[in-house]
Amino acid sequence: MSALSKKAIEQRLSSTDSKRLTVSPILDRRQIGPSSIDLRMGNVVMVAKAGGQSHVEPAVYKKVKDHDCVRYKQQKHERVDIPFGKPFLLHPGTLALVPTLEWVHLPVDLQGIVTARSSWAREGLNIATATIVNPDYRGIITLELANFGEIPIELYPGLRLAQIAFYVLEDAPTEGYDGQFKMSFEPAAGDISQDDDYFIPVKENKDKLSVCSNCGNGFDGGDV
Amino acid sequence: MRPVDFLKNECENLLSVLDQTLRYDYGLEGSREFYEECGQRLEYIQASLELVDPTSTHIVRELALNLEFLSELVCRIERSSLGEYSWPFVEEFKEISKALCTEKRVLKDRVVTRVPNVHVIAEGGLHTYSIYSDANKQLSKRRIFIIEFPRTLKHYVLFHTILGHEMGHAIYNIPLIQNELDEIFIENFVKASPVFKDQPTVVQWLYSEAAPQEVKARLNHLKTEHSIDHDDFFFAHADYDAWLQEFLCDFIGLLMFGPSFLGAVCHLLYSNDPLGRQVNEEHPLTGIRANTLLLAAESLGYTEWKFDQSVQPAVDAFWKDVYEKQETDPWFKVISKEAVKITVDKLQAFLANFPKTLYQAPDPENINHLVHQILDRCPPVGYKFTSEGPQYRQVDFRDIIFAGWIAQSQPGSTIKFSDINRLCEHGIMQQVSIKKMLENPKKPEDNKKAA
């Protein structure tokens, strides 16, 4: 597996065959670095809500149309739309999912690795994990932002927060990506229990699902 | 798309919105009962739509009404906030609204400009496109416009062009504009129409022997159930002025959004009136509206626009789809082509006084680029990366929407209508960022240096 250089990235971007890489739009050619492309913040922020639930519960992902499970998933994040020119304040310790402004499509022989730009990382802004973007993925890239500093960080849509580097796969697959985030338009919580059902015990009693092991209360004391 | 397919699609949208009502707790009672009851009703409608014969128009209509009512129920408990409607579209539409509705008043020695206050909300229902404008603005200095979107069609920017028609209603409430519009419309369209020139001739035509069976049945129903006959049709049932205003607003919508408006009208109006022959209190028959709009589109030359040969078959398919909605029964042919042409030309000249309001003939090269981006499942924007580096273009958001309508007509394409809408919505948002960059005077120089 080898990384693409700036020249190779530009060749891929301007290519018209199946090896074409799409990152649209690149608003400034200086976004293309020696071996990566800077990515800008998009207009949606999904902020993990404190107090919504007592804990992260993989079991809820197994039940698709159950009231409590849907409610659990829907209440995990507060969705905020931020037009250009308006700020979003990321408080210390907060986790927020934001989309990139750019739409990305990788050919089947490329893998992308997303990391924070070091200038932002030095301010305490962290992209929680180095996200792997699979070959043939198409859509926005979700950035998992966390403020590790001690003071809030003001963010504006359009700011360059992250960067993506590209690696050529050895023995590239012939079939494309078919994961749960294919053709993503905005961030969404993933299914953390997907294909791991056999490790998660069945919890038929809804009350058990919703009761906090520490205090014994339901999530909201309401209609649980 | 057949009406039954549209309704199936709408069921999926409503299910998604129903899930989202659980983001918050509403009231002390909790949400379980509401959620489960609505879910069961939706399942029933979905199952019925799977079984129904698509040509059984009365059953399809019944299901559409049930779905509409359910949608209203669901959306009433939803919040109307920035997240509930398509803000990229709204931001662009607000620009047009402000250009069109800004009022200038001469006060003694100075001119006062009053920009309207535009707000946006989302509501339930399949066709909840409307603009409330306060006709009486005695209490305030600035007029307030509230633009209302159907919540479930949040991302369906291709349908949002219907708001061009609603903008017509909104500006009709501005006295100075109303005078101008009346002068153009009544003189050139109403008085020239052999049927719509006055109420008695409309009634005579409606109750004529040649009227379609559906119209006769409805009029007979009005007579037997509500004692409304031809003598008091416009007194006790329908509103003649409202009917006329619908034609006027259709013309304004067409001039504002071009062929995309026609695409949206043909899909939305026929979704709850599959034959286009319903006799409605405030709207003339859908069939006549579609015919009139087609005459207007022809007179504006829309149907003659030529594009790249890789796109032209899709454009032809788009028009074929629209022409299929044309009402061919001779009873419906009561609008003269000449009257439509004169009226539309004069309205076009009047609206040209307001910047950004008119939809201009698109650059074929732009449309070609945008359509191919959509078919490639990439948001359509004025950007491409060539061996020379990134290239940018200013693109009108209405071109993006028109490209969406063309792409959805592309023969053999498998891309879903919902995905086309979301790609176009995303493209409109991205185009705003390109516009910001291009309007920054330093940026092109910087880019050049970088190259």
Image: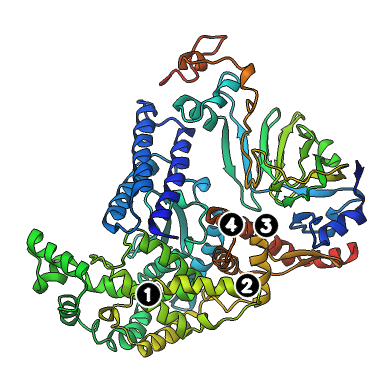
Q: Earlier in the sequence, mark 4 or mark 1?
A: 1
Q: Quadrant of the N terminus of chain B?
A: bottom left
Image vertical order of residue B74 relative to residue B378, above or below: above
Chain under callout 3: B
- Secondary structure of the residue carrying numbered label 1: loop
Image vertical order of residue A88 relative to residue B287, above or below: above
How far across and how far down the image is residue B389, in percent? Answer: 84, 64
The residues bearing labels 1 and 3 have C-alpha atoms spaced at a distance of 33 Å
Q: Earlier in the sequence, mark 2 or mark 1?
A: 2
Residues tagged 4 and 1 counted as in contact (Cβ below 8 A): no
Judging by the rendered image, the residue that carries numbered circle 1 is: B326
Q: Earlier in the sequence, mark 1 or mark 3?
A: 1
Judging by the rendered image, the residue that carries numbered circle 2 is: B311
* Residue B112 visible in the picture: no
Q: Earlier in the sequence, mark 3 or mark 2?
A: 2
Quadrant for residue B290, please give it: bottom left
Quadrant for residue A184, please give it: top right
Callout 2: 10 Å neighbours few (<14), some, many (20+)?
many
